[in-house]
Amino acid sequence: MLLACPHCHATNRILDERFNDDPSCGRCARSLTKGAPLALDETSFDAVLAASRRPVVVDFWASWCGPCRGFAPVFSAAAARHPQFVFAKVDTDANPNLSARLSIRSIPTLAIFGGGQMIDRVSGALPQAQFDAWLGQAVSA
């Protein structure tokens, strides 16, 4: 799979079976899957969900969306605090087929996937405490 580094944005080729080995960026050497949200597209989305042994938390967003922009720092901070998850972002405008397939009707929409299946989802920007509580509740259910 091809993953853009969430830190320096370099494109990295990762073997699906090596995704859980904490791959690092070939350019900046920082972790590709911990500490910052990955930018996923229609091609990489399914590959990441299939490969990850950790739950994948996805923020479906768009650049023109004020609540999405306001929630972005909360999401990024959570990625740094919760290494037990893979955090990812999907631009709904750039990936309309994926958005349609998952019935994303409002943004931001947050979803947690485990074992390739959606565990839970919620629409709307959440404050940090509520977002952290939702993460804990969704994976313990």
Image (spheres, grey):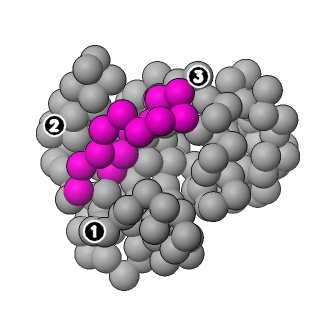
The answer to which image quadrant residue 64 occupies is bottom left
Q: Name the spot of residue 44 as percent of width and height, x first.
A: 68, 52
Of 15 and 47, nearer the camera is 47
Q: Earlier in the sequence, mark 1 or mark 2?
A: 1
Q: Which residue is mark 2?
A: 129
Q: Residue at coordinates 33% horizontally, 50% vertically from top-left?
A: 110
* Magenta segment: 110-123
| Image side of residue 75 versus residue 24, left or right | left
Say whether residue 116 is magenta: yes
Point out the tag, 2 or 3, that comes first from the N-terminus: 3
| Residue 52 belongs to magenta span | no
Label 1: how many residues lie within 10 Å, few (<14), some (14-19) or many (20+)?
A: few
Identify the residue under disc 3.
53
Residue assigned mark 1: 106
65 vs 2: above or below: below
Q: Main secondary structure of the magenta part?
A: strand
Residue 41, placed above or below residue 86: below
